[in-house]
Amino acid sequence: MKRPSYVTDKALKTFIKSALEEDIQDGDHSTLSTISGDLKQSAKLLVKQNCILAGVELAEIIFKTFDKNLKVETFIKDGETAKVGDIAFIVTGSARSILSTERLVLNCMQRMSGIATLTHDWDSRLVGTKTKLLDTRKTTPNFRICEKWAVAIGGGTNHRYGLYDMIMLKDNHIDYNGSITNAVKMAKDYIKKNKKKLKIEVETRNLEEVQEAIKAKVDRIMLDNMDVKTMKLAVDMIKGSCESEASGGITRDMLKEIASTGVTYISAGALTHSAENIDLSLKAVK
């Protein structure tokens, strides 16, 4: 699949460089002490749990960043279903290079595959509706690029990537400013003064705040921790004048009912903070 716009070569290089330095520092001494520098070997990525596979493209980039001479033959691509016993790819080249990158590749792929699998499962609950599933910024520091990429691979839609690409006025912004009206006015003035092209989303906690956000003419209204009945009333009030987003304590079992209210989006931090890693291993080809 096509990479999301935030998965740039520069961003990946920065992430991989930092991750390798964290792990290897002055040398992979287990490998350097026991494996000949001229030994060539192959290893297979073995799937040990049914899943939606994610991180295959990243794995190849990690291998080639560490050692450009490593060759990867891919059998299962990102976003495809993988079953127990499947071989996703075979990497061939320096045995030292394979061993030194093994754990970084597995850490990324196990985590990304877990997120993609959970996202795919949740997103399947929304088939037949117009509501889209969003992730959040509840991600692991310095690993956001992989976690949000995994959501996209699993069929979900990425929310804002960070604090810089959208204005989201949450409860504290509003409380510090005294009202939604004041906060939105300041945000619009900021956008105009700094010549930014940023959408404005406002978090609302009740129908009175929804009405205030509608009058403030924002791009999206978040319906935070509202029950389905209140959410439906809010969507009816909005009448398509802007996007709507259900958020707060979302579970898989709630998805269809929430979508029935007509909200544009459902956002769930669980996609990234509660996904379980998928069991994968890199095994020597004998």
Image (cartoon, helix red, strand yellow):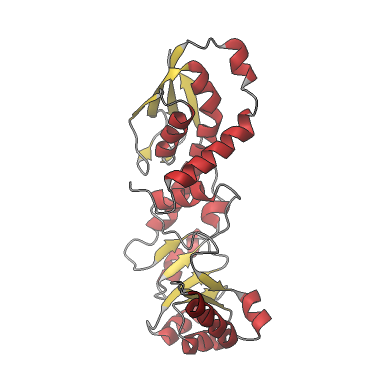
Task: Return the x and y of residue 22 as percentages of the image width and height.
Answer: 63, 35
Q: Residue at x 58, y 57 (%)?
A: 138
Residue 48, visible in the rendered structure: no
Task: Return the x and y of residue 52 as percentages of the image width and height.
Answer: 41, 43
Picture quadrant of residue 125? bottom left
- In the visual, does 60 lie left or right of 1? right
Total count of labels: 0
Q: Residue at x 43, y 35 (%)?
A: 61
Task: Return the x and y of residue 162 as percentages of the image width and height.
Answer: 53, 60
- Judge whether 263 appears above or below 132 on screen: below
Outermost residue to the right: 176
- In the visual, does 81 lie left or right of 67? left
Q: Residue at x 49, y 16 (%)?
A: 95
- Judge whether 29 appears above or below 131 on screen: above
What quarter of the picture does the C terminus occupy?
Answer: top left
Task: Return the x and y of residue 173 as percentages of the image width and height.
Answer: 63, 76
